[in-house]
Image (cartoon, helix red, strand yellow):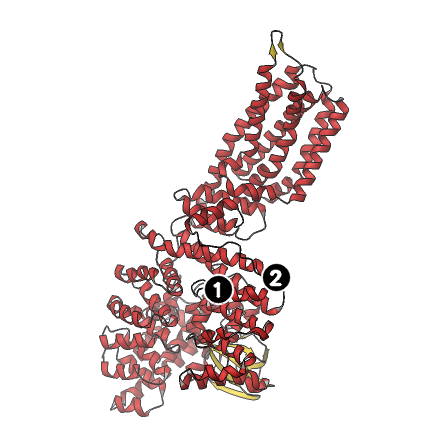
C-alpha cells in the first residue's frame, strides 16, 4: 500500500470521528425538540434517504460543481461545510452565554441549526469528499481500498447507529455532549484541510517516477532494412553476426534481392565465422546468397555498354548489380537514366544508389519521385541520406505541390529527419498554412522531432490548438444530434467520433510538448468517460499541473465538461461566433448543416459519409448544390457526389460530367457505372474500386487502427488493387511489386508457399507473400471465385505504421491470419497492441 493510500485511509478514520462528533451535536440539539428515540431513528432514516438520493442522482452534483471550482476548494468542500456550521455554532454559543454560563438550550432556531449540520455534511462528504478520495485510489489502482469505499457509507451509518445507542450513557451536560464534539469536529476539519494539501502534492509527485524520456528512434533500427536501409547496409557485418538465425536469414534474403555485389567481400569473410556456420539453415542461405551474387557480378563484368544493356535487358537483378557499382564508381548519367526508368524495381535500386551522392540532378529527380506511390519510400530514404542540401529544393517543390497531401507527407517526413534548424523552421512555418491538413501533418512531424520545443515556439501552436478544441466541441454536439441507428447514420456518427479521436490525440501530443507526458495521458484518458472518479482525477491533475496558463487550462477542462455553463462562457468570450448547441428540425437538416460547413471544419471523409447518408435516406431531396462536390478536385468527394447524382438525378449527371476534362470524365464515368450496373463478379476490377469503399475497408483492418482516417486517405495509394480470377494462380516473386502483404478486399482465397499446403483466408485477412518464405520464388493461390486484394509492400507498411513494426516482424514468418489476433484499439492510442 502506497503512502498516499495510507494517508487516505487515515483521513477516512478522521471522518468517522467527525461524524460521531456531529451526531452528538445533532442529538444534543434535538433533545429540546424531540424525544431521544425519535431523534435517533430520525437521523438514521435521514442519512439512509440521503444515501439513496445520492445513488439516484448518479453524481450530478459532482458534474455541476467540479468544473466551476479549483481542485483545492473541491477537495475541501466537506471541510468548508464543517467550518461554516462550526462558525454558526460558535456564534450560538457566544450569544447564549449568560451570567450563569452557557445555557443548555439554544431555542428553536438554534436547535434546528444543530440538527442540520450532520445531514448536510454527510451529503457533502458523499457527493464530493468520497469522489476526491476515490479518484486517487482509481489512479493508484488500489482494488482492496476501492472495494472498501463502496461499503464505507454503510459503515458510517452503522457506526452512528451504534454510537446513538450509547449516547444515553454519556454524562448529560453540554460540555460533554456539545462543546467537546464541536471542538473535535472543527479541529479535525482543519487537520483534514492540511492533509488534503499533502495528498494533492503526493498525487502529483506520484507521476514523477513514471517519467520517461521520449523515444525518437526505433531501437537497433540499423538492423532492419525496411526502417533504415543505409544503416542496414553500412552495418551488414554486425547485423549478420549479432542477429538471431531467423533475422540473419531475412537479412541475407534482403542482400540477395538488392543484388548487393558490393557486399561480397564481407559475406566471404563471414563464411569463416562460426557464429554464422553453426546454424545449417543460415549456412545454406549464406552460401546460396554468395553463389547468386557472384553470378550477378560475373554478368555485370561482362557488360560492354551499360547504356545499351539497361535499355535492352529484362534481367532486373543484373541491372541492380550494375547500379551497386555506381556507389563507388559513379556514372551519374547512368544513375539518372535508371532513375527515369519505367520499371519500379529499377527505380527503387537507383534511388538507393543516388542517396550516396548529393548531385543536384539526382535531388530534383528524387523529389519528383516522392509523388509516385511505387517508389516514394525509396526516394524519401535517399533524400534523407543526402541531408541538408535537399532542403531548399524541397521548399521550392512544396510550394508548387502543397495540395498533394501524399507529396506533403513525404516532404515533411524528410524535413523532420534532417537534423538542421532551417529544415525544422520550414515545418514551423507550415503551421501557419491555410490548409488544415498541412498544418496537422507539420505538427505531427514537429512532435516526432522534439521532446521539448523551444519555449518561444509555443505560440506557433496556438491557432492549431484553438482549432482542435473548437472542432472537437462542435463534433461532440453534432454526434449528440445523430440519433438514428441505421447503417448510414452509424457510419456518419463513427466518422465524427474518429475525427474527435484524431483531434484529441493531437491535442494530447501538443500538450505533452510542454507538460508531463504521464499527467497529460491521465487527463485525456478521461475524455468522454462516464467514470466519475476518472473525470475528477483528470480535473484535479489539470488544475495542479497546468498552472502556468489559465486559458489553456480552461480549454482542456471544457473538453472534459462540455456542458458546463461557466466554461462555455469562457469559450464564447474568446470565440463569440462559436455555436455550442445547434437545433435541427430533422436529420436531413443536420446532414445539410454538415455539408454546408467550411472545409476546414470537417474532413473529406466525414463529408463523404454525409453525402452517402443523403443518397440512401433522402434521395428524393437531392439538390443541385451537390454539383459543387461533383466538380471538386478531391477524388473522394467527386466520386461520392457523382455516384449520388447518377442514382438520384440521372438527367443532370451527363451535364455535370461534360464540365470535366475528357480523360477525367471518362475515368469517373466508368467507375460510377461499373459499380452500379455491373454484376458482383464484373465489379471486381483493379481500376474501379471506389475510394470511399477503399477507405472504409482499410479503416476496418486491425493493423491500420494506428492510422487516422485522414492518414488512410493520404496513404491509400500505397495499397495496389490486384484481382485474381477463379482457378489456380502461380505468382512469381521476381516481380517485387507482387511481394508484400496481400489483404483480401473481396472474396476468399486459399494460399500456399509450396503449392501443396494450402490455407484458407477470407475477407480482411492478411496474407504474407514474401520471398524469404517462398523458397521456390513462387507462391500459389486457389480461388473458387474471383477475389480482389489490396497489396502493400512490407517496407511501406513498416514506415507508415511506425509504432507497430514489432508486431509485423514477430509474425513475419507465419503464413496465417495473424491480423485477427490484433486488438482493435482507438486511434488516439499510441500503439496498435
Closest to the observer: 769 or 206?
Answer: 206
Task: Indicate whether 617 appears above or below 535.
Answer: below
Local SS, label 1: helix
Q: Quadrant of residue 19?
A: top right
Q: Position of residue 370 (x, y in %)?
A: 34, 74
Task: Indicate whether 438 appears above or below 265.
Answer: above
Q: Are the two marked residues, 1 and 2, in contact with CB atoms closer than 8 angstroms?
A: no
Which quarter of the rendering shows the N terminus? top right
Pointer 1 local density, CA inside 10 Å: few below 14, some 14–19, many at least 20: many
Left or right of 328 in this view: 15: right
Of all residues, the one furthest to the top in this rendering is 99
Local SS, label 2: loop
- Residue 277 at least partly seen: no
Q: Earlier in the sequence, mark 1 or mark 2?
A: 2
For mark 2, what is the residue?
Answer: 483
Depth check, mark 1 against mark 2: the one in front is: 2
Left or right of 251 in this view: 672: right
Left or right of 23 in this view: 645: left
Closest to the observer: 417 or 734?
Answer: 417
For mark 1, what is the residue?
Answer: 706
Q: Position of residue 113 (x, y in %)?
A: 64, 24
What residue appears at the point 55 percent right and 47 percent down from the top-left corner?
Answer: 534
Pointer 2 local density, CA inside 10 Å: few below 14, some 14–19, many at least 20: few
Amino acid at each position: 500500500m502506497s503512502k498516499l493510500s495510507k494517508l487516505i485511509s487515515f483521513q477516512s478514520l478522521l471522518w468517522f470521528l467527525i461524524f460521531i462528533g456531529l451526531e452528538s451535536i445533532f442529538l444534543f440539539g434535538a433533545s429540546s425538540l424531540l424525544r431521544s428515540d425519535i431523534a435517533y431513528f430520525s437521523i438514521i432514516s435521514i442519512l439512509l434517504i440521503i444515501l439513496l438520493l445520492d445513488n439516484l442522482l448518479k453524481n450530478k452534483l459532482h458534474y455541476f460543481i467540479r468544473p466551476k471550482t479549483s481542485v483545492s476548494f473541491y477537495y475541501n468542500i466537506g471541510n468548508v461545510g464543517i467550518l461554516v456550521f462550526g462558525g454558526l455554532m460558535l456564534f450560538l454559543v457566544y450569544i447564549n452565554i449568560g451570567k450563569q454560563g452557557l445555557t443548555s438550550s439554544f431555542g428553536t432556531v438554534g436547535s434546528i441549526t444543530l440538527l442540520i449540520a450532520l445531514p448536510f455534511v454527510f451529503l457533502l462528504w458523499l457527493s464530493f469528499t468520497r469522489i476526491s478520495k476515490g479518484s486517487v485510489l482509481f489512479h493508484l489502482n488500489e482494488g482492496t481500498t476501492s472495494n472498501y469505499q463502496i461499503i464505507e457509507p454503510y459503515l458510517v451509518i452503522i457506526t452512528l447507529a451504534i454510537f446513538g445507542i450509547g449516547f444515553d450513557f454519556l454524562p448529560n451536560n453540554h460540555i460533554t455532549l456539545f462543546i467537546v464534539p464541536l471542538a473535535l469536529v472543527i479541529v479535525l476539519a482543519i487537520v483534514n484541510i492540511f492533509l488534503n494539501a499533502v495528498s494533492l502534492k503526493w498525487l502529483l509527485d506520484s507521476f514523477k517516477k513514471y517519467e520517461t524520456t521520449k523515444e525518437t528512434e526505433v531501437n537497433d533500427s540499423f538492423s532492419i532494412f525496411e526502417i533504415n536501409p543505409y544503416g542496414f547496409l553500412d552495418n551488414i557485418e554486425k547485423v549478420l553476426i549479432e542477429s538471431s538465425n531467423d533475422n540473419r536469414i531475412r537479412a541475407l534474403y534482403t542482400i540477395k534481392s538488392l543484388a548487393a555485389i558490393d557486399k561480397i567481400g564481407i559475406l566471404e569473410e563471414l563464411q569463416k565465422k562460426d557464429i554464422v556456420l553453426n546454424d545449417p539453415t543460415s549456412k545454406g542461405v549464406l552460401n546460396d546468397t554468395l553463389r547468386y551474387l557472384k553470378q550477378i557480378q560475373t554478368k555485370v563484368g561482362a557488360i560492354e555498354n551499360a547504356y545499351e544493356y539497361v535499355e535492352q535487358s529484362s534481367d532486373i537483378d543484373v541491372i541492380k548489380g550494375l547500379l551497386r557499382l555506381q556507389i563507388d564508381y559513379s556514372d551519374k548519367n547512368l544513375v539518372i537514366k535508371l532513375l527515369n526508368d519505367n520499371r519500379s524495381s529499377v527505380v527503387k535500386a537507383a534511388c538507393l544508389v543516388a542517396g550516396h551522392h548529393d548531385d543536384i540532378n539526382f535531388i530534383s529527380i528524387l523529389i519528383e519521385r516522392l509523388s509516385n506511390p511505387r517508389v516514394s519510400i525509396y526516394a524519401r530514404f535517399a533524400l534523407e541520406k543526402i541531408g541538408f542540401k535537399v532542403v531548399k529544393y524541397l521548399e521550392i517543390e512544396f510550394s508548387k505541390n502543397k495540395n498533394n497531401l501524399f507529396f506533403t507527407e513525404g516532404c515533411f517526413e524528410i524535413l523532420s529527419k534532417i537534423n538542421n534548424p532551417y529544415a525544422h523552421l520550414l515545418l514551423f512555418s507550415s503551421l501557419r498554412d491555410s490548409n488544415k491538413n498541412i498544418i496537422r501533418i507539420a505538427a505531427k512531424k514537429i512532435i516526432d522531432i522534439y521532446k521539448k520545443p523551444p519555449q518561444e515556439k509555443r505560440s506557433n501552436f496556438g491557432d492549431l490548438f484553438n482549432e482542435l478544441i473548437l472542432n472537437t466541441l462542435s463534433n461532440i454536439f453534432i454526434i449528440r444530434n445523430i440519433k438514428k441507428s441505421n447503417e448510414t447514420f452509424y457510419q456518419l456518427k463513427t466518422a465524427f467520433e474518429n475525427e474527435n479521436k484524431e483531434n484529441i490525440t493531437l491535442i494530447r501530443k501538443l500538450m505533452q510538448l510542454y507538460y508531463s507526458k504521464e499527467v497529460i495521458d491521465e487527463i485525456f484518458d478521461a475524455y468522454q468517460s462516464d467514470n466519475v472518479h476518472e473525470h475528477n482525477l483528470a480535473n484535479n491533475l489539470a488544475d495542479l499541473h497546468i498552472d502556468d496558463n489559465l486559458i489553456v487550462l480552461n480549454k482542456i477542462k471544457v473538453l472534459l465538461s462540455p456542458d458546463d455553463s461557466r466554461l462555455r462562457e469562457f469559450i464564447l468570450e474568446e470565440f463569440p461566433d462559436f455555436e455550442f448547441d445547434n437545433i435541427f428540425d430533422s436529420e436531413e437538416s443536420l446532414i445539410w448543416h454538415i455539408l454546408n460547413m467550411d472545409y476546414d471544419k470537417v474532413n473529406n471523409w466525414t463529408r463523404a459519409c454525409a453525402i452517402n447518408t443523403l443518397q440512401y435516406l433522402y434521395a428524393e431531396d437531392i439538390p443541385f448544390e451537390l454539383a459543387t462536390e461533383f466538380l471538386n478536385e478531391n477524388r473522394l468527394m467527386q466520386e461520392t457526389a457523382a455516384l449520388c447524382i447518377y442514382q438520384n438525378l440521372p438527367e443532370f449527371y451527363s451535364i455535370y460530367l461534360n464540365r470535366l476534362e475528357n480523360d477525367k470524365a471518362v475515368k469517373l464515368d466508368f467507375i460510377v457505372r461499373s459499380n452500379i450496373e455491373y454484376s458482383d463478379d464484373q465489379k471486381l476490377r483493379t481500376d474501379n474500386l471506389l475510394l470511399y469503399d477503399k477507405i472504409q475497408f482499410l479503416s476496418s483492418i486491425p493493423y491500420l487502427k494506428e492510422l487516422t482516417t485522414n492518414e488512410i486517405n493520404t496513404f491509400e495509394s500505397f495499397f495496389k488493387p490486384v484481382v485474381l480470377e477463379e482457378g489456380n494462380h502461380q505468382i512469381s516473386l521476381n516481380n517485387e511489386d507482387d511481394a508484400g502483404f496481400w489483404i483480401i478486399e473481396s472474396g476468399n482465397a486459399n494460399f500456399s508457399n509450396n503449392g501443396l499446403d494450402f490455407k484458407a483466408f477470407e475477407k480482411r485477412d492478411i496474407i504474407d507473400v514474401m520471398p524469404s518464405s517462398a523458397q521456390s520464388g513462387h507462391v500459389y493461390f486457389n480461388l473458387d471465385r474471383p477475389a480482389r486484394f489490396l497489396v502493400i509492400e512490407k517496407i511501406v507498411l513498416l514506415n507508415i505504421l511506425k509504432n507497430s513494426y514489432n508486431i509485423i516482424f514477430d509474425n513475419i514468418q507465419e503464413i496465417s491470419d495473424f491480423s485477427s489476433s490484433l486488438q482493435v484499439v482507438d486511434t488516439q492510442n499510441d500503439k496498435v497492441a
